[in-house]
Image (cartoon, rainbow, N blue to C red):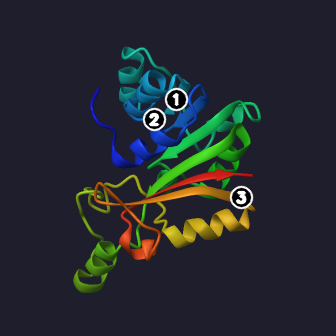
C-alpha cells in the first residue's frame, strides 16, 4: 500500500482500532483502505466526484456519492465513532454547518485543512499581490475548489464558538510535523480532533 498523505497518516495513527468511521470527501479511498487493513475499522465514505467514487468501489470500499453540504443529514445521530473531513472543509459552502453535522453523526471528528495564513501565502500576497500557487496549493485561484480561506486561528475560534473540545491538534510544514508554537503562520496544514 502506498504511503498516506501526511495529514491522513496523522488521522490514521489516531483512530482507535475497530472504530466505525465515516470519511467525508474520501477522494480515492486511501485513508479508508488504511483504516480497514491496519486498524480493522468499519470505514465508510462519502465523495462528490463520481470518478473517485468509481475508483473506491473498484477497490471494494463502501462509498456513496454525496455532498458534505447537504447529504450528511441522511445519517442518524452518533452513527459513527469518528467523522473525518480531510482537506474538504474549505471547499464546502457553509463550513460551520458542515462542522455541526460532523459532530452530530460522529462522536468525535477529525478535520484537516490547509492553513491560508502560512508565511508563504502571506509573503505571496504581500510581495506579489497575488494568490499563491505552491506545492500544497498547486491550482490557480480561478480553478481552485477552495471557496473559504481558513486559518488555524479562524478554526480555533469557530470550534470555541461552538463549544467543542479540541482533543488533539497536529501541524504540518511540508511533510513534517511541527510544534504548536507559532503554528498560525508556520503550519501549512492543520489536523484537529474534536469532541463535544
Residue sitting at 54 percent across and 32 percent down? 66
Label 2: how many Cα within 10 Å (few below 14, some 14–19, many 20+): many
Q: In the figure, residue 131 lies in which quadrant?
A: bottom left
- Where residue 82 appears, as percent x and y from the top left, is 62, 38
Q: Nearer the viewer, residue 31 or 104?
A: 31
- Where residue 108 appears, as percent x and y from the top left, is 66, 44
Side (left or right) of 157 relative to 170 = right
Q: What residue did someone put label 1 on?
A: 45
The circle drawn on residue 75 is none
Q: In the figure, residue 167 lies in which quadrant?
A: bottom right
Q: Alpha carbon of mark 2 to alpha carbon of mark 3: how far?
A: 24 Å
Q: Alpha carbon of mark 2 to alpha carbon of mark 1: how far?
A: 6 Å
16 in relation to 92, above or below: above
Q: What residue did someone put label 2 on?
A: 26
The tag earlier along the polypeptide, 1 or 3, is: 1
Q: Nearer the viewer, residue 2 or 154?
A: 2
The tag earlier along the polypeptide, 2 or 3, is: 2
The answer to whether mark 2 and mark 1 are in CB contact below 8 A is yes
In the structure shown, which secondary structural element does the residue marked by tag 1 occupy? strand
Q: What residue did someone put label 3 on?
A: 164
- Where residue 36 appears, as percent x and y from the top left, is 48, 23
59 in relation to 134, above or below: above
172 in relation to 50, above or below: below
Amino acid at each position: 500500500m502506498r504511503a498516506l498523505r501526511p495529514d491522513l497518516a496523522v488521522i490514521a495513527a489516531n483512530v482507535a482500532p475497530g472504530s466505525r468511521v465515516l470519511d467525508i470527501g474520501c477522494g480515492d479511498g486511501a485513508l479508508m483502505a488504511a483504516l480497514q487493513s491496519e486498524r480493522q475499522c468499519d470505514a465508510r465514505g462519502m465523495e462528490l466526484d463520481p470518478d473517485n467514487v468509481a475508483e473506491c468501489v473498484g477497490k471494494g470500499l463502501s462509498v456513496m456519492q454525496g455532498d458534505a453540504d447537504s447529504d450528511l443529514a441522511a445519517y442518524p445521530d452518533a452513527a459513527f465513532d469518528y467523522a473525518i473531513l480531510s482537506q474538504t472543509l474549505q471547499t464546502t459552502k457553509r463550513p460551520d454547518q458542515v462542522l455541526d453535522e460532523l459532530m452530530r453523526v460522529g462522536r468525535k471528528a477529525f478535520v484537516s485543512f490547509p492553513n491560508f495564513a502560512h508565511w508563504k501565502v502571506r509573503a505571496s500576497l504581500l510581495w506579489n499581490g497575488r494568490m499563491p500557487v505552491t506545492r500544497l496549493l498547486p491550482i490557480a485561484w480561478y480553478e481552485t475548489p477552495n471557496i473559504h480561506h481558513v486559518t488555524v486561528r479562524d478554526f480555533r475560534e469557530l470550534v470555541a464558538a461552538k463549544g467543542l473540545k479540541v482533543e488533539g491538534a497536529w501541524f504540518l510544514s511540508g511533510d513534517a510535523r511541527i510544534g504548536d508554537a507559532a503554528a498560525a503562520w508556520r503550519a501549512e496544514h492543520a489536523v484537529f480532533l474534536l469532541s463535544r
